[in-house]
Amino acid sequence: MGQSDQGKLTSEISAKETPSLDMKWSRVRHRFESEFGEQAFNTWMRPISFASQDAGTVELTAPTNFVRDWVERHYAGRLKDYFNEDDAHIRDLRIRLARKSDLKPASSMAESPKQTNAAVNSGYAPNNGYANGSVNQSSALEPRYTFDSFVVGKSNELAEAAARRIAESNDVPFNPLFLHGGVGLGKTHLMHAIAWEVKRRAPEKKVQYLSAEKFMFEFISALRFKDTHAFKQRFRNVDLLMIDDVQFIANKDSTQEEFFHTFNALIDNRRQVVISADRSPTDLVGIEDRIISRLGWGLVADIHPTDYELRLGILQTKAEQDGQVEVPVDVLEFLARRITSNVRELEGALNRVLAFATLVGRQVTMDMTRDVLQDLIRANDRKVTIDEIQRAVADYFNLRLSELLSDRRARNIARPRQVAMYLAKQLTSRSLPEIGRKFGGRDHTTVMHGVRKIEELRQEDSQMDDDITRLSRQLDS
Ligand code: ADP
Ligand code: MG
């Protein structure tokens, strides 16, 4: 570092009373943001903290393995370059998982000195007379919505990791956390899970969870009863505020205004805020730009639609939790394949099947499932045809379609034929006789025999199970 740089740096330091490492780190962050943009910055840089610099090695921390791996894979090289612009001696950059002992709030280094004083207080429980609200709220939390019961897959792993980080940390890792995704994909579940976890770990913390609708309702009654002071106090004295479905306050000007003040007050006091919406901040229409921009300051995590694996995982978990009724795997697979709209509907379908089985005291079977869920299945129907199934199976096993449909009984042809029958039974709503007719006019008992055979083989033979899974998935898309 040259003489003049040194001088400049020193004067900045004394002006801001910030150690020079903070300055370097804050420059690195700025460089990152100008190169990769605000979205990448908010998602990946905000959660990262500067830990130490020792000889030629800089150490950063990340809140989760996921963030760490991602940043390492995509940005580590550039981050090192940025450090090198100030300090050519740095040869090595490491990112490790943040430990409990890393008490410093993740973004404190970039905050202005004004706010660092408040940061010191962030882990404590304010002691004031406004506890009533949080007691009320807690009754609204759904006991089922915990981290334990939340199944993680590709589509929701960032959101889940961020939620956990907030629930588990003593500081404010990113603020706010903005969760968005389509209806029924687990936003509310994650917010309740945060609340439960915080209550468990730090019962002294004040947690408020409410829908934006309720927020508005309470604000309006406070206005009516001229009680806005209590309203403000109530929301501004919490450690963690979660507001669900903020799209609801679009075009509600005075509620937005109040929300914005509350939100700013909490963020300035380094209290954690979690927001959800059915769309991203930038897609929120009817909400003021300054609010939208501030909503995007923290971590924005979207929840994508589920894929087949996640749906199956969720069903397995739910079926296990229920525990009363045994649900065969093929029924779970059938549901995961057929009910693709959202998790709420998926759960609804499983519950309906379970309720029916319990009521009539029968075992859950494929036939019963199809019966009970006729309407749902039709609504989600992708309409795979038997012809498509036959073509896909012939392709998969390197046979000609004519061979598959022929009378030949050689194992290498007869088995794939049975696979195709099995899939026809599973994936379409055709009856056994109809399927038989489509397979060169075979009898329905032949079809039934084939279906049973494959059911058995799936249990014993993992290769067979694999083949079926692949074919189903292929036909599904
Ligand atoms: P949203 O608030 O996004 O509309 P919810 O959180 O209300 O969605 O979720 C709808 C239902 O689906 C809830 O019963 C929830 O428990 C369940 N659900 C959603 N995602 C998952 C998941 N990944 N694992 C387990 N259950 C889930
Ligand atoms: Mg919700």
Image (tube, rainbow, N blue to C red):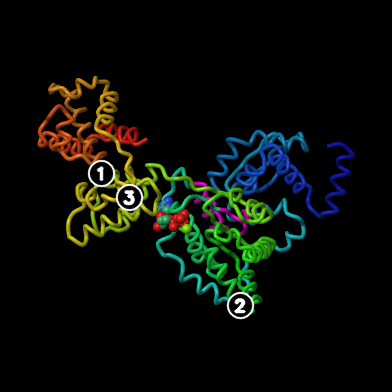
Element on which disc 2 rests? helix
Q: Secondary structure at mark 3?
A: helix
Comparing marks 3 and 2, which lies closer to the viewer?
A: 2
Check if residue 154 falls in the magenta segment: no
> Label 3 to label 2, Cα distance in Å?
49 Å
Q: Name the residue located 55 percent from the left edge and 62 percent from the top edge.
A: 243
Q: Position of residue 249 (x, y in %)?
A: 58, 61
User: In the displayed structure, would residue 233 be above or below residue 429?
Assistant: below
Residue at mark 3 to residue at mark 1: CA–CA distance: 11 Å
The crowding category of the residue bearing disc 3, from other C-alpha atoms within 10 Å (few below 14, some 14 to 19, many at least 20), is some
Are the residues at dot 3 and dot 2 in contact (C-beta closer than 8 Å)? no
Q: Earlier in the sequence, mark 3 or mark 1?
A: 3
Q: Is residue 37 above or below residue 232?
A: above
Residue 224's label in the rendered image is 2
Which residue in the protein does label 1 denote? 330
Q: Earlier in the sequence, mark 3 or mark 2?
A: 2
170 part of magenta stretch? yes
Q: Is residue 100 left or right of residue 15?
A: left
Q: Which residues are magenta?
A: 157-178
Q: Tag 3: residue type?
A: Gln
Q: 233 left or right of 199? A: right
**Mark linked to residue 316:** 3
Return the residue nearer the eye: 456 or 225. 225
Mark 1 or mark 2, whichever is nearer to me: 2
Measuring 26% from the left and 27% from the top, which residue is drawn there?
393
Nearer the camera: disc 3 or disc 1: 1
Residue 93 quadrant = top right
| Quadrant location, the N terminus | top right
Depicted 286 relative to depicted 407: above or below = below
Residue at image point 31% right, 53% down? 349
Three-letter code for the amino acid on which mark 1 is drawn: Asp
Numbered circles on residues, count: 3
